Amino acid sequence: MTTERLYYDDAFLRSFDAAVIAVREDGWAALDRSAFYPTSGGQPFDTGTLTGARGQVRVLDVEAEDGVVWHKTDLPLTAGERVRGDIDWERRWDHMQQHAADHMLAGAAWQLFGGVTIGLHLGAEDSSIDLDLPGGRTHLTEAETRALEETVNRRVQQDDPIRCWFPAPDELARLPLRKQPTVTEHVRVVAMGDYEMVPCGGTHPRSTGQIGPVKILSCAPARGKMRLRFLAGMRAVNYFRLAAACAESLAAALSAGLPDACNALAREREGALSRQKESTQRLAQAALQVLEAEKKGSVYAAHLVFADHDTLLGAAREIITRQPEAAALLSCPGKNGRMLLFARGAACRQDMARLLRECGARGGGKPDLAQGSAPDGEALSRAAGLLLRQTGTP
Ligand SMILES: [Zn+2]
């Protein structure tokens, strides 16, 4: 029992007549001939319908086993019945474009860099090739990536013929194949222009021009090799549409032309950072002025209504660095009323974490820095009073 694979002779065949030659209880049916492509060589299966005398069933999955193509259907078929098969052409055409682009990239990577393809993946979003590069390299430079992309797209635009055939053994032995076949009989070969020739049982467009644009998305290390992600055909066109729309709205938001958008964004960010730095410095200065005015001996205690956590920390550090015997008891508005930050200088012996507990605030920390919260200003007043008594400040 074998299935005649109609896509070998004509990858553009969308409809065909066939007979069901076997069925399995788990919903799989074998046909005597089929244009449905079964998952293999990195190219996913076709979907579509089979229509018989009793109606239409959907083909959900396709697999080949020992020369037979099996079709998983949503409703059972009967052995012996005649069916018309129709494949989902949009899905197949997309697969043919991605798969052929895969050949073009693999062939060019071999010629330009000596990269050997060791894995292929045709995904729902994008596709990838894993390359083994000489010297264990796991990336391509930007210039190399561009050279690869340009070579492939130039060859696409040359619109060179793509030919698939089963050469006789003596002819096969003479062919300059990029990779040796993994099977010994009925080896099918695909040739694209004069730059790609490998054994392949997949489906391909008639010429390289039908692949459409090929866009490399990234080259990155993966499992000690290099993984190249790409899009071809309508996927590349759709990606360009999305990327262009993003870039144009970004440029419009920055009131810049498209070529200057990245520089405009960098300038914008630089400006925002410097404004933020200035504002932090102004707040720190204001905090220090308040604290100097409120200080008693070496105890600096104040509630800073305009500050946030970073301002408290900056002001506390400034004080204890300048005056190692000082302690800074600071608060600012916080989530649970007030945020508290107690810090001491290197020459101050009072335990800030203990003080935080004793004044009735929530939180904790270390003897030199403690942080917490309190519902109102009472905890801070209590802490300041305790500390002034402990340090003997009048
Ligand atoms: Zn192929």
Image (tube, rainbow, N blue to C red):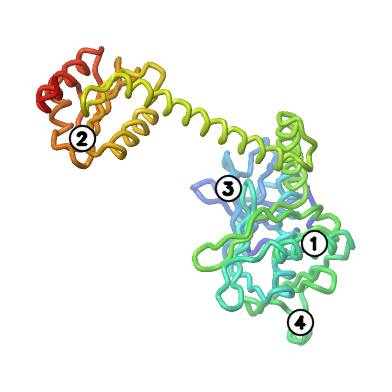
Amino acid of disc 4 = Pro
**Which residue is labeled 3 in the image?**
72
Q: CA distance from mark 2 to mark 1?
A: 60 Å
Q: Residue at x 59, y 69 (%)?
A: 118
Amino acid of disc 1 = Glu
Question: Secondary structure beneath disc 1?
Answer: helix
Crowdedness near tag 1: few (<14), some (14–19) or many (≥20) residues, C-alpha within 10 Å: some
Residue closest to the eye, 284 or 247: 284
**Which residue is labeled 2 in the image?**
365
* Residue 178 higher or lower than 173, as above or below: above
* Residue 344 higher or lower than 382, as above or below: below
Residue 150 numbered tag: 1
Question: Secondary structure beneath disc 4?
Answer: loop
Q: Residue at x 57, y 35 (%)?
A: 274
Report the mark closest to the observer, 1 or 4. 1
Q: CA distance from mark 3 to mark 4?
A: 38 Å
Amino acid of disc 3 = Lys
Q: Residue at x 89, y 63 (%)?
A: 158
User: First in sequence: mark 3 or mark 4?
Assistant: 3
- The CB of the residue at mark 1 lies under 8 Å from ligand 1: no
Report the mark closest to the observer, 4 or 2. 2
Residue closest to the eye, 296 or 176: 296
Instruction: Give the image location of residue 227, x and y in percent.
Output: 59, 62
Amino acid of disc 2 = Gly
Crowdedness near tag 3: few (<14), some (14–19) or many (≥20) residues, C-alpha within 10 Å: many
- The CB of the residue at mark 4 lies under 8 Å from ligand 1: no
Instruction: Give the image location of residue 387, x and y in percent.
Output: 14, 25
Residue 237 numbered tag: none
Instruction: Give the image location of residue 333, x and y in percent.
Output: 35, 17
**Which residue is labeled 4 in the image?**
176
